[in-house]
């Protein structure tokens, strides 16, 4: 499988600010996704990052709050905008298209704390 | 949309014993069911997956079974070892040639007692 990296690995931010999280893969992939994992909870899909077009958001998530970019087949960013303490979570990117069409692999995550 | 239920939330077993985690899903269109292991401070790691055209799949000490009629699937770990201690998540999705995001269960904290 490929190497999936995320930057930053963790951050502590003040409310009202924004943070951009990067996801980099060392091979071209078909699909990239962003998930949120609140403390002690399961993973919830935020959006599908589409290469060259606008991301597809799940119910309850909007572009103004979580703008996403995917300029090429190996890189995507997720921005958490106008943060509040409720945004404190682990944010994970995942990719498919490496070993099979729908086998999904995850990055190490970005642990965000909002004060 | 899809809904995945996972039980138990916590499972404690003696080292060397077997562990079984069960999941049910709601959308009969779902056809791909992966299992992930997540250790503290790390991202989820795929350990095994199964597709709807298969009833069982095994990889060394790990096996997954799928009952499409009942819409449930289970993870079986035999001869458990201390390194099996982690949180395990089941997931489901419909894969129609492309790839869709996963719907996850709430997770099972597996504790292996020495």
Image: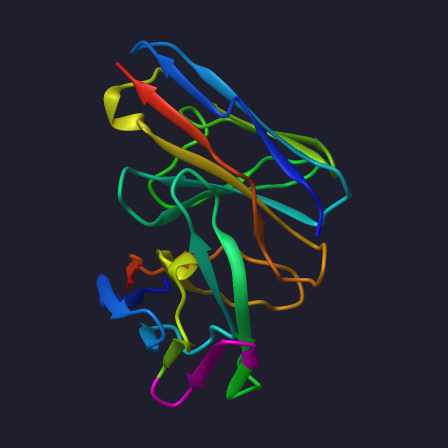
Left or right, A69 with respect to A59, comes to right
Tell me what residue is drawn at x 41 percent, y 65 percent. Answer: B81
Percent position of residue B110, x then y: 30, 61
Q: Is residue B65 magenta?
A: yes
The residue nearer to you, when weighing B20 against A8, is: B20
In this figure, what is the number of numbered marks? 0
Q: Position of residue A10 (x, y in %)?
A: 44, 23
For this rendering, which residue is in front, A83 or A103?
Answer: A103
Looking at the image, what colour scheme do you see?
A: rainbow
Which residue is rendered at x = 36% and y = 62% of the image?
Answer: B1
Q: Residue A49: give x, y in percent of width and height.
A: 59, 39
A93 lies above or below B81: above
Residue B30 seen in the current view: yes
Residue B57 is one of the magenta-drawn residues: no
The stretch of residues the image draws in magenta is B58-70
Q: Please identify the quadrant where the C terminus of chain A is shown.
A: top left
Residue at the image position 25 percent from the left and 27 percent from the top: A86
Q: Where is residue B75, by image quadrant?
A: bottom left
Q: In this rendering, would B49 be left or right of B1?
A: right
Where residue B87 appears, x then y in whole percent?
Answer: 35, 55
The answer to whether residue A80 of the structure is visible from this angle is no
Majority secondary structure of the magenta segment? strand
Q: Which residue is painted at 22% across and 68% down in the image?
A: B8
Q: Residue reaching furthest front?
A: B114
Q: Report the front residue among B59 and A37.
A: B59
């Amino acid at each position: 499988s490929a190497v999936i990296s995320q930057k930053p690995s963790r951050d502590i931010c003040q409310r009202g600010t924004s943070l951009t999280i990067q996801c980099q893969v060392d091979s071209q992939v078909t699909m990239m996704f962003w998930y949120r994992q609140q403390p002690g909870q399961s993973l919830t899909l935020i959006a599908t990052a589409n290469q060259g077009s606008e991301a597809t958001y799940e119910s309850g998530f909007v572009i103004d709050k979580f703008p996403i970019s995917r300029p090429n087949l190996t890189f995507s960013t997720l921005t958490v905008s106008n943060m509040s303490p409720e945004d404190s979570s682990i944010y994970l990117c995942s990719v498919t298209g490496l070993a099979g069409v729908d086998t999904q692999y995850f990055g190490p995550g970005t642990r965000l704390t909002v004060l | 949309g899809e809904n995945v239920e996972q039980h138990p939330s916590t499972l404690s077993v003696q080292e060397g014993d077997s562990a079984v985690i069960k999941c049910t899903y709601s959308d009969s269109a779902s056809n791909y069911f992966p299992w992930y292991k997540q250790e503290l401070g790390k991202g989820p790691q795929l350990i095994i997956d199964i597709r709807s055209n298969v009833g069982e799949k095994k990889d060394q000490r790990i096996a997954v079974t799928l009952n499409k009629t009942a819409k449930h699937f289970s993870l079986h770990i035999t001869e458990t070892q201390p390194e099996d201690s982690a949180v395990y998540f089941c997931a489901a999705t419909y894969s129609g040639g492309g790839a869709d995001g996963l719907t996850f269960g709430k997770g099972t904290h597996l504790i292996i007692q020495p």
